[in-house]
Image (tube, rainbow, N blue to C red):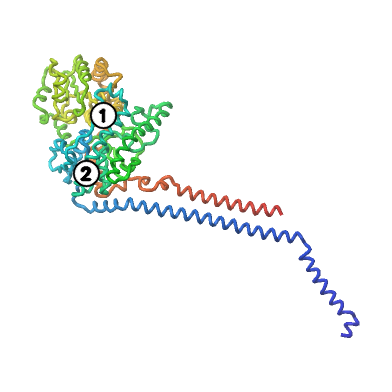
Amino acid sequence: MTETKLLGLSELRSVAVQPTYIHRVELLNSSPSCSLLTDTHASLHVRLQRQWRANAWLFLTLGLMFCLGRLKADAATTTVIGPKSKTDNAVATSSDLYIVLVSIPVFDKMLPLKHLAETLLFRSVRVGFALPENCRQWVHDLEGLEFISLGSIEGKSRGMARDPKELDQLGVYTSYANTLQYYASFQRPMFQALLQELTADRPDLVVVDRYTFAGFDVCHRLQLPYVVNNPHLLVDIDSPPVYIPAPFSNFTMHTTSVLERCLNICYRLRFRLGLVHVYKEINAVRQEHGLEAIDSNYQMHGHSLVLVNSVFGLDEARPMTPQFRMVGLLQSQKLQLERKEAESCSAERSRFPAALTTWLKAPEHQEKPLVFISFQTDVPMAPDFIVTIMNALETVNVRLLWKITLKEQAAFDLHSRPRDSVFFLGEGLDDATVLALALEIELLITAGDFQSIQAALVVGVPILGLPHSAEQTEGVNAVVRAGAGCLLDGKSFSKDRLRLEVDKMLFDEREHFKRNAKYLGELVKTGGGAERAVDELLTVAELGSRHLLPRRNLQPLYKTYLVDVYLIYGAILCGAAIILRTFVSVVLSIFQL
């Protein structure tokens, strides 16, 4: 201690420690830049934490919403499709199929189903046919068919014009709406009887005509699997692309101009707006039956096989989903065999009356072309219309085979015409039978019944159409566009014009029309007819129709239009944008220091 004091080391030690302490205090408290940097880092850290929390909550919310949407959609899909799958499995294990055909009491809608029933019976399938009692005679010749009587039902006025001039004044859109109202008038009276019959004896499959709305109602009520038969052209049943010509526009997509393509949208809009009032009436009846309203074609046709009695060539070719099968003309198998026998001259035409057979074989008129005239017997015709046809064709060197009722013959005084080359045929034979077995026919003059048109084309007979309704106009126009016929509307129909058209088709341009009719008939045959239609029916009866349906018909709209996918992409892009914004904020904060 004494030496330390002498040397002064104790004081030096105290001084050395104290300045060190003071220096450290000065470094911590006297530098303002370091304090600012610390505060900046602290606030930046807090901001980053807040942004990351916000981003996490955003992603969590979006994911939760997406999961809830998927769960609801899957539950709805299971609810709708579940019963159908059970039904399909039940049918697949059934060894004895029972198929019921349902049609309104309109002959040209019933006839394709009759030929379908004939082919099904030939394959030993149990078949029932549901029709009003007053239509029993239409199918009485089918052995083994079970007729399901729906009582005596009479519809409203069919709403068809009596001649082309009246149709021209009415307009095709009004005419089509009137025709649909006539078809819909059978919905209410057919429902209860059909419901009772199908409840008591439940079929494995129901084939419903496109315009038999009571059939759809019963199938929806009982959850029965069904197939739709469309007895006409497509007429937008497939919801085609916008470039396909609209119904009643009389356009063809191969020659349309820019103006016609612009107008095509207007024509389709007008066509669909014309259906609104009709479907309001249909939905009102469905509500009486405790069923949901129909908002679109998908609810009636979108979950089933649709047999279209047409082919591409008559209809414009287009992309279609597998549920639509273009089967062409459904024709009787027996009639096809008789046609082959008649062509080989090995058999007499036993279905014809003896008087008709004798008249066809009369040698004095063999060199004259035979013209077959047939109009629908359930629609009254104007006297002036009939007289004009008769006066026009009297001056043409042809034979006339005219299918007309006895009542109309007496009313129009046709028998008083002194002409041996005219034969009046009653209602005993349908048009297909006459066209198939009378090989001499070279021209069909018709209002435009679609089954008669196709039956004529199959045997290579051209068409001269005098349509009385919008449906008939559409069918005849399809033939005219293909070069296999002519059409006279209200503006062009007259005695002189009719005579000129017949002369042109039978003499001046005979080969042209004959060649095109034969070509179009070959196209109709490629559809497969009743045989292919039955193959499709039996496949659906055993396996169901789910494999034919596009995904858009079986899934919610958000899946069809990829709404969920776009939401995920949007969330990813939003997340990337937020991360980028955060990164930019950090970089800017650093460079601003």
Look at the picture and state if 205 lies above or below 481. Answer: below
Q: In the displayed image of the protein, which residue is found farthest to the right?
A: 6
For residue 155, side relative to residue 580 (left or right): left
Callout 2 amino acid: Gln
The quadrant of the rendering that contains the C terminus is bottom right
**Element class at badge 1:** loop
Please name whichever residue, 151 or 93, is drawn nearer the observer in this view of the structure. 151
Mark yes or no: residue 356 visible.
yes
Please tell me which residue is depicted at 31% across the width and 42% down the height of the picture: 300
Q: Earlier in the sequence, mark 1 or mark 2?
A: 1
**Element class at badge 2:** helix
Look at the picture and state if 8 lies above or below 563. Answer: below
**How far apart in space, not on screen, are marks 1 and 2 (Cα)?**
25 Å
Q: Which residue is mark 1?
A: 159
Q: Mark 2 packing: few (<14 Cα in 10 Å), some, or many (20+)?
A: some
Residue 122's disc is none
Q: Position of residue 319 (x, y in %)?
A: 36, 38
Please name whichever residue, 519 or 433, is drawn nearer the observer in this view of the structure. 433
Q: Which residue is mark 2?
A: 192
Q: Position of residue 556 (x, y in %)?
A: 39, 48
Q: Position of residue 251 (x, y in %)?
A: 36, 27
For residue 59, side relative to residue 584 (left or right): left
Q: Mark 1 packing: few (<14 Cα in 10 Å), some, or many (20+)?
A: some
